[in-house]
Every structure is written in structure tokens, then in C-alpha cells.
Amino acid sequence: MGTIWALARKDLKLLVRDRSGLFFAVVFPLLYATFFGYIMSGMSSSDAQVRGIRVVVVNNDDSSESQAFVEELKQDEKFDVLVAQSRVEAEDLVRKGSRSAMIVFPEGFGKTLSNPFVGASEAIELGIDPGRSMQASMIQGLLMEKLMSGFGTLFNDSKRMRSTVADTLSSIQKDPDIEPAFKFLMVPFLKSVDRFYTELPNTQTFAQNGESSTGSSGGFQPFAIERVDVVRASKDENPSNLDSAFQITFPQAIVWGVMGCAASFGISLVTERTNGTLMRLRVAPISWTTILASKALACFIATTLVAAMLIAVGVLIMGIKIHSFLMLLVAILSVSVGFVGIMMLLSVLGRTERSAGGIGWAVLLILGMLGGAMMPLEFMPESLRQFASISPIKWSILALEGAVWRRFTVQEMLLPCGVLLGIGLGCFVLGSRIFRIMGK
């Protein structure tokens, strides 16, 4: 054990002397967290060309009109819709990161869909995963566009429009509970609309070819959308807001720091092989198991310390609040084990330091992109999005977020941490075998 500790200290000293390695392990993740933290504080996105946004829908109205709208939403290629039976189920899917947002249609929603003159129902609730807040405005815009598109068809159909107006006018005049002031305003308005469609039955004032947009009705907005963050909160906390945008960016920053450590240690193994250090160690009475165990221990210590340092900066300077420090410790240890294995596999990808560094970082960046660390998964082609679950970056971010702000339970932490441990052990065993073959 003394030999392992001595070799581990040697590797830690080499890391400290490697300025580029320290930059990617310490400085770069801090720059990443700070820069994107400020961006996410006020950034919005509205790319209507995005496809397959993963949302979960709760239909509390359950009318034929609302059910038909949900079916239309499911057919829209911009959305990937899952229908939940309850709000609790929908919140759980969003909080765990399985869905980007939940859409809750209130009672009376179907009535407003079929007749825009009856008045708006309660606000449609749009619950957003705080980790995907950059997509919130885009989702809201696409949903409003979908809601308003049905009115283009209604306004272009003179017979249907006159029938709707007549039914609304009759119900307003007969209902004794409606305020007189509302009747005074609505009755003349509805009569003028009926007269308009009587005199111009073929008009297409509001839309062309049955299409509409959110601005096609001159500001007419029968629907209201209320946006909230879906976060599990304790009894004395507000569940709709996070304390800081940095709570979202720092888990990703930690992963970038760990990636930097893994890449540096992977290159160091190649350096020791090409410089003959490994050969000299082999001449000494030291086994391959001891050599690789020391390298793994040094990498594990470095990644854990980098993660701990970044957390300390986040808590003390950025004001991050941690849900559970015990959960965070488990997440960090699992992430470190995962990347120790990845480090070992990266070390056999190149014969020289330059090739190993280039290939290693290329692999890590691809894994980062697949795992959602560089861009939202909804912005990626569907063919690539299917491979997100194979990326350890995805599970690392999810485990750290679960401990920091998603408020995962012990059972919910088992999946991401278990996947990371499996990836780490599998990659380490495979990389060790290849490395021994190359060292002979």
C-alpha cells in the first residue's frame, strides 16, 4: 500500500506541474460556469425548426375538444408528447429530467377552444425543467402558435363562425348571472361580427389557407400561459424558483473539470510509456496491478478534489445551496470512478502524447455533446439524440443535479450513480487489459 501511495503522490505532483492540465481542470470549468450562468439569467430561445421537444401533457379538462387538441399536439413533429394521468406524475418526469416540460390544460380549456368568445379559461400551466430554461420561451411560443392556429380555420369558415357567434349571443342574453357591463360590451360586438360574416361570407381576413400565427388575430389572445419551474421544494421553500442560475451551471462545470483531469492522466500514461518510465517501473519489483492501481488512485483523488473545490467556490462565492451534501458526496465519488475508467481507456487510444491528447479530447467532447453538456438535446438530430444514454456525461450531470437542486431521493440516485460505476469499472478493466498488451 505504501508503494501505491508513493506513486500516486508522484502523479499528483506531475499534474500540478502541468499548467495546461491544471487550466482544463480548474480555470476552464470556472469560466464555463460563470459565463453560462449569466447567459441563462436572461436568455431566451425561439427556434421553431426544432423537432421532438420532449413534453408531458396533463389534460384536466378531458372534453372531446381538449382530447382532440392533445392528439393534434402528438402529431406535431415539433413535439414528442407523453400523456400523464396526473400532475404529480408529470412533475416527477420533468424533475427527473426525463421530459423538458409539462403542459397542464385546465378545466374549461375545451370550451375556449371551440368558442373563443366565452372568455379564457384558467391559465395553461407550462412547467419547465430549470436545467433547460433556455428552451422555455421556445416551447411557450410553439404552444401558443399551436393554440392559435385552430382559430384561423374558424375565422375563415363563415358558416361555422356565424353559428358560434349565434350560440354565444344566445347564451349571454339568457344567462342571468352574467354582469350587465359584460353584456353591454359583448352583445353589440357579437352582432357586428355576425353582420361582418353575413356581408362578406368569403373573406379571409385572419389567415390564409387555414394557417395562423400568434399575431394573426390582431392581438386576440383567448389563452394565457403561466410558466413555472418544476423543482421539488421543502415545506419552507418556494418551489417555483431556484436560488441562483449557478445551481444549474455548476454541475456541468464539475463534469468539465473531471473531464480535464481524466484527459490529463490519460496523456500522462502515454507519456510514461513513450519515455520509458513504465519500463523502468517494470524492472523494479512492482506489478502491473500496482502501477495501474496507483494511476487510478491518483486520478480518483484529483477528480474528487477538483469537484470539491468547485463546489466550495459555488457555495461560498456564487451562493449555491446544496440539497444534500451526502448525496453530493455519493455523486462525486460515482463520477470520479466513472472517469477513472474512462481515463484508462483513453490512455490506449494513441501511441504518442499528441495523438492521445487529440483523440482523447475529441472523444470527450463528442460524449459531452451527446450527453447534453454543450447544447440541449432537442437541438440535435434525432439520429444522434438516441445515443444520449450511452454518454457518461449525461449520467454525471444528472447525478450532480439530483444532489444539488433536483432533490433526488436515494432510490432516484441509484440509476445515474449505478450507470457511472458500471461504466467506470468496465472501461478500467478493458483499458487495463489493452494497456498491459501494449506494454509487453
Image (cartoon, rainbow, N blue to C red):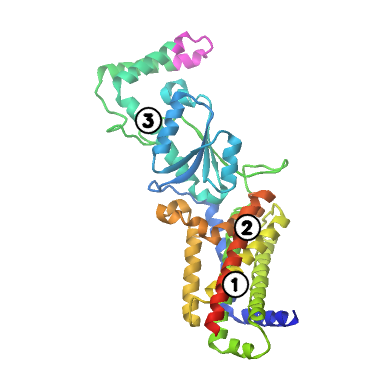
In percent of the image, x 64 and y 49: which residue is there? 412
Q: Position of residue 227 (x, y in %)?
A: 54, 39
Lower position in the chain sequence, tag 2 or tag 1: 1
Residue 236, quarter of the rendered image: top right
Q: Position of residue 285 (x, y in %)?
A: 68, 88
Residue 179 in the figure: left or right of residue 207? right
Which of pointers 3 and 1 lies earlier in the amino acid sequence? 3
Identify the residue under disc 3. Answer: 150
Q: Residue at x 33, y 17 (%)?
A: 162
For the residue labelled by badge 1, is the local secondary structure a helix, a strand or a loop? helix
Q: CA distance from mark 3 to mark 2?
A: 47 Å
For the point 61% across and 55% down, which residue is it?
416
> Would you say 167 lies left or right of 440 here?
left
Of labels 3 and 2, the one closer to you: 2
Q: Which residue is mark 1?
A: 261
Q: Residue at x 53, y 50 (%)?
A: 132
Q: Position of residue 143 (x, y in %)?
A: 44, 38
Evaluate if marks 2 and 1 touch, with contact meaning CB atoms under 8 Å apart.
Answer: no
Does the magenta run of residues contain 101?
no
User: Callout 1, which amino acid?
Assistant: Cys
Looking at the picture, tell me which residue is in the foreground, 386 or 370.
386
Q: Which residues fall within the magenta stretch?
A: 171-185
Q: Quadrant of residue 215?
A: top left
